[in-house]
Amino acid sequence: MKQIDMSSEEFLEEFEKTKKFTDKVNKNFGWVYHPEFDVVEGVTMGLARNKMLYGKRFCPCFMVIEEDGKPKSADDRICPCKPAIEKEIPQEGKCHCGIFCTPEYVQEYKKENGK
């Protein structure tokens, strides 16, 4: 497997592109980021890494497997994934990885966690 230097210029450029991508996803769906910076940064780094490794922003919380010589995410989770759009966010207020949330979820989270 290709090694990724997360301090390299190549990775940092992909990380910035991924941040713009997730900003656009939030805007398009009316979502917001998780209030914990570490969650957002970790998932964004994983998405950028997977884009560099596999050519797609596979959800970093699920395995990427090879099928017929091509990378494929378990449960076909390419960000923003169908399970998050159709089930997780409407029902739970956040996606499995936690990066994308409803404003209501974030408000409740902040209240419960004293933020």
Image (cartoon, rainbow, N blue to C red):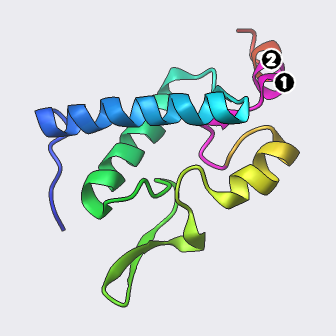
**Residue at numbered disc 2:** 107
Question: At numbered mark 1, what does the secondary structure look like: helix, strand or loop?
Answer: helix
Mark 2 → mark 1, Cα distance in angstroms: 5 Å
Residue 83, percent from left and from top = 71, 59
Residue drawn at the location 36% of the way across and 90% of the way down: 68
Q: Residue furthest front?
A: 28
* Up-down relation of residue 1 to residue 67 (above or below): above
* Up-down relation of residue 111 to residue 56 (above or below): above
Question: At numbered mark 2, what does the secondary structure look like: helix, strand or loop?
Answer: helix
* Crowding at mark 1 (Cα within 10 Å: few <14, some 14-19, many 20+): few
Residue drawn at the location 84% of the way across and 44% of the way down: 90
Contact (CB < 8 A) between labels 2 and 1?
yes
Residue drawn at the location 31% of the way across and 63% of the way down: 54
* Up-down relation of residue 75 to residue 5 (above or below): below
Reply yes or no: does residue 82 show up in magenta. Answer: no
Q: From where the camera sits, is residue 71 visible?
A: yes
Q: Residue furthest top?
A: 115
Instruction: Tell me the amino acid under the disc marked 1.
Output: Glu
**Which image quadrant for residue 35?**
top right
Query: Would you say 25 lies left or right of 58 here?
Result: right
Residue 113, percent from left and from top = 75, 17
Range of residues picked out in magenta? 96-108
**Residue at numbered disc 1:** 104
Residue 64, percent from left and from top = 42, 69
* Up-down relation of residue 78 to residue 92 (above or below): below
Residue 47, percent from left and from top = 41, 47
Residue in the foreground of this view, choosing between 73 and 36: 73
Instruction: Give the position of the C terminus as an image quadrant.
Output: top right
Query: Would you say 65 lies left or right of 37 here?
Result: left
**Which image quadrant for residue 26?**
top right
* Crowding at mark 2 (Cα within 10 Å: few <14, some 14-19, many 20+): few
